[in-house]
Image (spheres, rainbow, N blue to C red):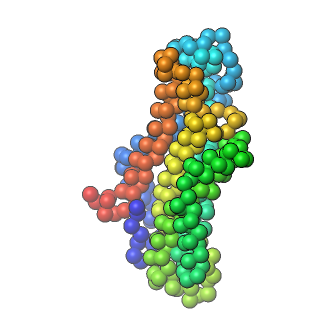
Amino acid sequence: MTTLQEVAPREPAGVRREALYFAVRNGKLMAGFGIVLVLLLLGLLGPVLFGGAPNEYGPKPMTPPSAEHWFGTTTFGQDVFLQFVHGLRSTFAVGVIGGGIAAVIGMVVGFVAGYRGGIVDEILNMLTNVILVIPTLAVLLIINAYLGIRSVAVQGLFIGLTQWPWAARAIRAQTFSLRTREFVDLARMSGAGTGRIIAKEIAPNMSSYLFMTFILLFGGAVLIASSLDFIGLGPTEGVSLGLMLQNANQWSALQLGLWWWFVPPGAAITAIVGALYVANVGLDEVFNPKLRET
């Protein structure tokens, strides 16, 4: 992860210019974000540009890719490409919701525990460790069994509420190293409160670290959501990439040779998570001068 500065941060404008200079020259970062951007735009614009109902039955079942059906059709004549673009939108939505909720909780717990220390840190650290050792997938399975998951928003909420502990621990550790710096001491001596010091002094000096943490949480949310969808415990409304894989498996697409049904969603999930990882490595090189020099 990014090595934080040992002294007070430089002027934000200078930092942004330097980061931008090295970012546009980092192949990993550009390639990773480029792939994610293309898929994101396809998910946002595809349903609008191409129209149609993704689950509507058609008159030509099991049709291979063609000019009429770019990704072919399912055993029920459903257009796989329409399902694909709608599935991309749902997948990005659950990643943003789940990753965003986990990031917010992780930052609040990590910042407060790391800065306050003492009994506050012990209580929050104990809570974090308890949540950390609970099998996430098992908890989500139980929640789904009793409450059910009816929408992408609810799925993202459940994922976010269970994915924050590792982020909280990482942010807590970095906050510990920053709370004794001179610029934090100066803010404390000036009478600034805990919230202001965290928001104005500590968090800005960790902005790159926080952004990279969100990327990892986003990718984790996409993987967990796809896993739940694949085993039939995802949202019952709409279409997602994981649900496409689940339907393809349920209706024997592999045995029937309908590779166009399961390859696109599987490749898209792999591309999103893999591209985010590559972009994260690129960001580490951009923000970490030691890695940048090598």
Residue 110 visible to an observer of this rendering:
yes
Judge whether 172 appears above or below 277 on screen: below
Residue 180 in the image, given as x and y percentages of width and height: 47, 82
Hey, which quadrant is residue 60 in on the image?
top right
Residue 216 in the image, given as x and y percentages of width and height: 49, 53
Quadrant location of the C terminus in the rendered image: bottom left
Judge whether 133 appears above or below 117 on screen: above
Judge whether 130 appears above or below 88 on screen: below
Hey, which quadrant is residue 127 in on the image?
bottom right
Residue 150 left/right relative to 124: right
Quadrant location of the N terminus in the rendered image: bottom left
Residue 236 vs residue 276, the one in the foreground: 236
Residue 263 in the image, given as x and y percentages of width and height: 48, 27
User: What residue sits 56% from the left and 71% below the top?
Assistant: 126
Residue 82 left/right relative to 71: right
User: What residue sits 55% from the left and 30% below the top?
Assistant: 245
Tally of marks: 0
User: What residue sits 39% from the left and 76% below the top?
Assistant: 6
Judge whether 198 appears above or below 91 on screen: below
Residue 108 in the image, given as x and y percentages of width and height: 60, 68
Determine the residue located farthest toward the left in the rendered image. 294
Residue 197 visible to an observer of this rendering:
no
Determine the residue located farthest toward the top in the rendered image. 59
User: What residue sits 52% from the left and 36% below the top?
Assistant: 39
Residue 191 left/right relative to 178: right
Determine the residue located farthest toward the bottom in the rendered image. 189
Residue 54 vs residue 290, the one in the foreground: 54
